[in-house]
Image (tube, grey):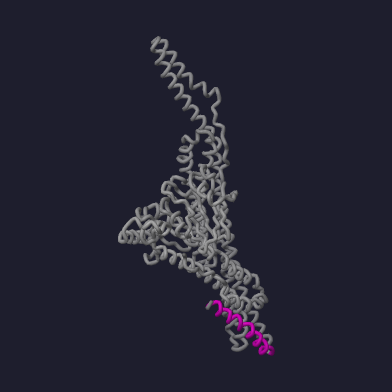
Amino acid sequence: MIEKVSTTNIAPSIEEAIKIIAPIITKVGKGEQLKQISEKFEMLKSNPVCVLVCGEFKRGKSTFVNALIGRNLCATDTDICTSVVSVIKYSDTESVTRFYGDFSNPKSQQISLDELERYTVGSAEEIDNTLFVEIGLPLDILKKGLVIIDTPGVGGLDPRHASLTNFFIPKADIALFMVDVNEPMTTTELAFLKNRVHPYARQTALVVNKADLKDAASVEDIRLDAIAKVSSTLQVDKNSIEAIAVSSAADAYPDSDLGESNFAALRGLVSRMVNSHRADLRAALKANLIELINLTITPLQAQLKQIEQPDVNQITQLDRQKKEYEQKLSELKDQGSPFRKAVSDEITIRREAIVNYINEANVTLQSDTFPRLLKSPQAKAKNGGEWLGRMLNDAIAEIGSDVTLQLESAFVKIAEMPQFEGMLKVDIRDYNSNIIIRNVDTSVPINKRLTPLMSGVGIFTAASFIIPGIGMLIGLGVGAYVAYSNQRDSANAYTESHLRQVYQPQLSGSINSLNTYVNTRFAEFQQEWLGVITERCKAYSASASQAIDNINLVKNQVGKAVNMRTQLQKAIKPLVAAIEMVKNS
């Protein structure tokens, strides 16, 4: 099984530090900030780490997941392909919930484990439009704080697979990207890793699967080749890339004589990545806590220093700091400031790139995808209107999921600008827009059915008149074929026209909605970054201002300085001790 994973409890020193400083922090009006940080530390106890398994189709992902959790759960037949996302989490009892419909308002239904394949393998119609399933299992590997997300393979013919995978990628803390030992990494795989996986998962590792199909030397060559390609594509150091070769089949079926699975090393790698991720989260929260303590301690230390070692320049220095943050606040409000211009230019570049993508996707949708679907036999069959609506929904969902990922990437890049000094955090809201599916009546009116028959009747009449007898038979055959062909073409044209009238406006509306979503999200992001930076600048400015007030208080109450020093020392001592406790936790 997987190695023991850290539960990320608040270390006793951090709990103790928060308890010690709470009265002091609250007294200076920062109790709410401390409460929020404390709650986030508490959340680390229960928040699981999401490990997402992804890659192109037919890479053995489902077999790998079965081996990882030690349970033959996901369908693995070589002739079938997983069509939905499976979210596997801990539960005291076995349970399966399927979510179906659309992501804007999914419906849910409890099903049994025996029904799992029925709702996870096949086309959208065959699986009753299932989007994803949540599987609860009483397994130790999950109880230790893991959620495993098995995604459909991308790169196949079904656009739903890509959109479903796109939806879950930003939720991944760790991504395991599957590579097939028989098919060294392709250009499309590298593009998917670069554009979809790498920007969003906090950590990524390559898993070269099906190692039992080649000798050890060949497998190692393929592993190194994958590392080299990824290094070149992502422009990262080879030594920073985690890549491991395994045989999922050998681990899932230990009696099959397939050789060493290497899953012990794989589980060790996952454990290290999980612990590293949790350590990063703790480090970020510790930094926030230390910053809050420092904002509280600075005015007190300034006051104490003025009592113990009077310094005429201290107020000048603090006043300079205060003015620096006031200048930043002024620049935030000034549309023409270099700061605002730099951020605005970056936002414009990112927004234009996304809008251009939407325009290009719309051209493809309107000039290729939609006409091709209209002419397909499924669109003209019974319930063809419903089939077409589902296909168009999938196409729109794929575009929407791509846009959501690009938005998140854009906001992350903007947040990383040096002007923000790491103060800006990003939270993306998913896009949802759906075509209204209609069971369009495609039956052809009687007058449109009779008109195409007339050319066939004309051929039959002419042949009978010119060549009596045998001409009648020839005319009948040719006329019947022409009549049938004309009527079929007429019926197809009528059906296409009717379907186009129903769905064309909705397609245009969905693209307009997507553009509105992008513009709205950028506007919301503008307010977010302005608010975050403003509050942070105000906090530092207030701290400096309070320090100045404290020093003036000392100057005006020289007679009380000794008593004040004792009080200050009592307040500062636990704050300084708390910082050390947090650093060493």
Q: Is residue 143 above or below residue 95?
A: below
Where does the image place residue 543, in percent across and percent down from the top left?
A: 61, 75
The residue range painted magenta reads 559-583
Taking the image as shown, residue 187 lies to the left or right of residue 326, namely: left
Please say whether residue 474 is one of the residues in the magenta stretch: no
Q: How many marks?
A: 0
Residue nearest the viewer, comparing 291 with 180: 180
Residue nearest the viewer, comparing 311 with 428: 428
Please say whether residue 575 is one of the residues in the magenta stretch: yes
Residue 399 in view: no
Residue nearest the viewer, comparing 246 with 356: 246
Where does the image place residue 500, in percent across and percent down from the top left?
A: 52, 35
Taking the image as shown, residue 265 lies to the left or right of residue 129, namely: left
> Quarter of the image holding residue 46?
bottom right
Q: Is residue 117 above or below residue 6?
A: above
On-image quarter of the C terminus: bottom right
**Residue at 45% from the left image edge and 54% from the top image edge:** 62
Q: Main secondary structure of the magenta part?
A: helix
Where does the image place residue 295, in percent across and percent down from the top left?
A: 59, 76
Taking the image as shown, residue 450 lies to the left or right of residue 209, namely: right
Where does the image place residue 367, in percent across and percent down from the top left?
A: 46, 40
Taking the image as shown, residue 245 lies to the left or right of residue 571, namely: left
Residue nearest the viewer, comparing 57 with 414: 57
Residue 22 in view: yes
> Quarter of the image holding residue 329?
bottom right
